[in-house]
């Protein structure tokens, strides 16, 4: 029996893997060979890339793009919430240093 | 007939059981709390985190992430195959998913041993305190995922037990293990 191949799945995996590879560049660009320093830019980039990856997993692997609008809104709503919570916590902590 | 097929294609359905999605969103909120506390503390006291974070090998983290992404792709293929009635292929894909999960676990466990041997144990410093807590609780979810995959494979083996909804529910759980790791990886290995 032949299974219909969904060509979006390998593309999704490739996009997720390429986004993961971006971290190698961010890690190098953040401090190179020098000692590690706090960096709001590297932190923000890392968090945004992670949230984009999670959304791809939701939409493509977990089939949320075929799900009722409520589930789409709930998953997108949580992504906005966690994005605000993570960046807010980091910036608040940095401000209270 | 064509109309029936078209309407079926455009019918939006929740993948798996809605209860599993309630659990996924609940878990997502719990982890949002863990991550926020961790980020607040590390931003407030960077000297307690950054020197110890430098002990982590980012390349190992990248490798483990790619392995877990492969497992997610594999379980998505399992769902597709089961939907198409190709249960043998679905079973193989579920087995492959478990294999990728085992590879992830072995790499993670070897990381734990390596860092502990370096003197970065659970209670050695604040960074590794969070590292072991977050990776440990994630691995607990991974181990539960192996039980879920075993149930999926058991279901797929007999026509009397097969349930597409249960297979999709198992896949939804496994993807949750994947997306939680995507966040944990970025927060532990990359942020500054």
Image (cartoon, rainbow, N blue to C red):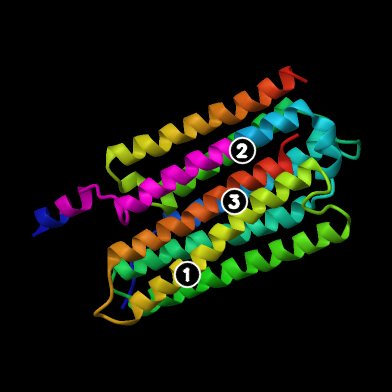
In which quadrant of the rendered view does residue A86 lie?
A: top right
**What span is colored magenta in the figure?**
B6-35
Circle 2 is placed at which residue position?
Answer: B35
- Element type at marker 3? helix
Q: Is residue B86 visible?
A: yes
Q: Residues within 10 Å of mark 1 (few under 14, many from 20)?
A: few
Q: Which residue is mark 3?
A: B181
Dot 2: element = helix
Residue with the mark numbered 1: B147
The residue most toward the front is B123
- B168 and A13: which one is in front? B168
Residue B165 falls within the magenta-colored stretch: no
Q: Quadrant of the N terminus of chain B?
A: bottom left
Measured in 3D between alpha carbons, the distance from the residue under mark 2 to the one under mark 1, in whole angstroms, is: 26 Å
| Quadrant (top left, top right, bottom left, bottom right) of the C terminus of chain B | top right
Q: CA distance from mark 3 to mark 2?
A: 12 Å
Magenta region's main secondary structure? helix
The first of marks 3 and 2 along the sequence is 2
Query: Is A33 placed left or right of B41 in the picture?
Result: right
Q: Is residue B125 above or below residue B109?
A: above
């Amino acid at each position: 029996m032949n299974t219909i191949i969904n060509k979006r799945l390998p593309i999704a995996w490739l996009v997720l893997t390429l986004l993961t590879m971006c971290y190698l560049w961010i890690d190098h660009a953040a401090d190179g060979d020098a000692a590690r320093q706090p960096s709001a830019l590297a932190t923000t980039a890392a968090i945004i890339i992670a949230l984009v990856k999670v959304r791809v997993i939701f939409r493509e692997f977990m089939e949320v793009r075929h799900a009722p609008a409520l589930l789409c809104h709930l998953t997108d709503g949580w992504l906005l919430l966690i994005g605000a919570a993570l960046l807010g916590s980091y910036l608040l902590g940095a401000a209270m240093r | 007939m064509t109309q029936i097929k078209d309407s079926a294609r455009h019918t939006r359905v929740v993948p798996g059981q809605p209860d599993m999605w309630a659990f996924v969103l609940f878990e997502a909120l719990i982890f949002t709390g863990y991550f926020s506390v961790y980020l607040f503390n590390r931003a407030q006291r960077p000297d307690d985190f950054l020197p110890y974070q430098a002990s982590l090998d980012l390349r190992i983290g990248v490798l483990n992430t790619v392995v877990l992404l492969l497992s997610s792709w594999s379980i998505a293929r399992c769902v597709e195959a089961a939907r198409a009635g190709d249960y043998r292929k679905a079973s193989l894909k579920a087995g492959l998913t478990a294999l990728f999960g085992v590879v992830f676990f072995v790499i993670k466990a070897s990381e734990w041993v390596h860092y502990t041997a370096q003197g970065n144990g659970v209670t050695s410093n604040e960074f590794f305190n969070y590292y072991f807590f977050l990776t440990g609780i994630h691995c607990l979810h991974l181990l539960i995922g192996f039980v879920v995959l075993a149930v999926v494979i058991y279901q797929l083996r007999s026509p009397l037990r097969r349930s597409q909804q249960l297979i999709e529910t198992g896949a939804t759980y496994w993807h949750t293990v994947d997306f939680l790791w995507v966040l944990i990886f970025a927060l532990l290995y990359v942020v500054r």
